[in-house]
Image (spheres, rainbow, N blue to C red):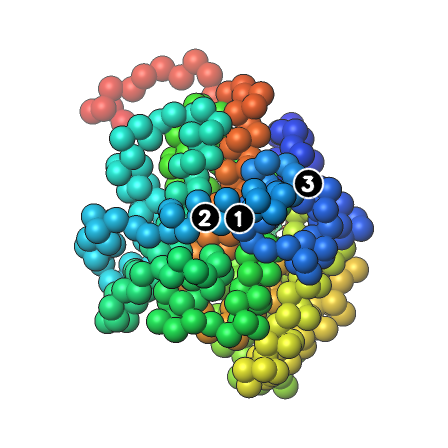
Amino acid sequence: MSTAAKGLEGVIAADTELSFIDGEKGVLEYVGIAIDELARHSSFEETVFLLWNKRLPKKNELDEFRTLIRKNSEISDATVAQINALPKTAQPMHALRTMVSYLALEDSEPNSVKPDEVQRKALSILCKAPAIVTTFDRRRRGLERVSPDPDLSIAANFLYMLNGKKPTETMERAFDVCLILHADHGLNASTFTGRVIISTLSDIYSTITGAIGALRGPLHGGANEGVMTMLNEIPSVDDVEKYVLDKLKRKDKIMGFGHRVYKAYDPRATYLKTLAKQLASDTGNSDLYEKSHRVEEIMDREVGSKGIYPNVDFYSATTYHCIGLQLDLFTPMFALSRISGWTGHALEQLETNRLIRPGAEYNGPHGVSYTPIEKR
Ligand code: ACO
């Protein structure tokens, strides 16, 4: 019998002061502040500062931080040329991962792990990621790229560069809230990946590139795209019950439900549910919200007693659709936000670094003699 903790469940592998999760009570805090408070009162820029400095900024600090963000938001002509060289058929998550890795090649000293250098490089990655994703997306749609507008927030700029027109205040705020809600979440799979990479004293470009790769998986951040695919497959609210029951019977997972840590309602999902409902009504997508809500009702009836509730990805799907994002931009949008959390954790790991190198229980044979190739 293996003594390994499958999926490392319950294993405490790091100390952190960034996010606190109480999975039984459905609580999430960033540096002690309830996620709901941040979603109501903060901005993504302020949340990034919080995660990188473990305190809220003073007004002048936030102004300075916003100025730095503006200065870092444009990508070089060489980066644009690299994006233009990518196949138009590539998936945006693969494009983003490749281009974050590429940014290291434009840095004359990519390897420094001094905290201020890591923060400076990470800020550059965080600020450039929206331009990378939108440049890639507009090119595949045959549209000219749109440069960032220095007067706009990260949220507004993303939508501006994507659509070529400034978003409404409601859309900007909705997108900003999504960025806040996705910024950090304990030692999730991609953050753990990032901490492992930086623990080797590798660089922040490799850290974020690796973390993007982990986030893409359908059991992690890729689930938001799976949710939308599912909602598209269900013709109407009346078809939801049969669809869900058939899947459960086949032991298929319903995307956007369940969580390793939460056995209560994910507080991010609570917030996103309200947001999705409002945006769906504002944008004529109420049928999508109704389908989502019906999926939740059936899941609650069937598996709610096992502690399987909607996670952050479930109502994100309806929210992003209403904001106007194409399906395969859902997970890149998650990545744009989570770069902030990955960086916070990388900085924290470096504070008291020791190489992360767990053990494995060997269950194979011993003393096997080497068989020459012609005798196998
Ligand atoms: N639909 C149906 N059943 C589920 C679901 C689901 N979404 N999630 C868990 N279960 C069931 C499993 O079938 C299993 O049942 P069993 O005990 O009868 O065999 C039990 O709950 C435990 O499931 P595990 O997969 O072992 O739980 P684990 O903690 O490893 O997985 C995970 C968590 C990966 C999130 C899982 O719930 C899942 O696959 N969900 C769907 C994908 C998803 O939404 N991922 C996003 C998570 S949030 C994030 O990463 C940003």
* Label placed on residue 63: 1
Image quadrant in which the C terminus is located:
top left
Measured in 3D between alpha carbons, the distance from the residue under mark 1 to the one under mark 2, in whole angstroms, is 6 Å
Q: Classify 10 Å Cα crowding around label 1: few (below 14), some (14-19), many (20 and above).
A: some
Type of amino acid under label 2? Thr
Q: Is 221 or 255 nearer to us in this picture?
A: 221
153 vs 58: above or below: below
Q: Position of residue 6 (x, y in %)?
A: 61, 37
Asked if the residue under mark 3 is in contact with the one under mark 1, i.e. CB atoms within 8 Å, the reply is: no
Judged from the image, the secondary structure of the residue bearing numbered disc 2 is helix
153 vs 321: above or below: above
Measured in 3D between alpha carbons, the distance from the residue under mark 2 to the one under mark 3, in whole angstroms, is 24 Å
Residue indicated by mark 2: 67
Which of the marked residues, 1 or 3, is nearer the chain's N terminus? 3
Cβ of mark 2 under 8 Å from ligand 1: the answer is no
Type of amino acid under label 3? Val
Type of amino acid under label 1? Asp
Q: How many marks?
A: 3
Point 39% across, 30% down: residue: 203
Point 23% across, 24% down: residue: 373
The answer to whether residue 82 of the structure is visible from this angle is no
Cβ of mark 3 under 8 Å from ligand 1: the answer is no
Q: Position of residue 351 (x, y in %)?
A: 56, 23
Residue indicated by mark 3: 31
Q: Classify 10 Å Cα crowding around label 2: few (below 14), some (14-19), many (20 and above).
A: few
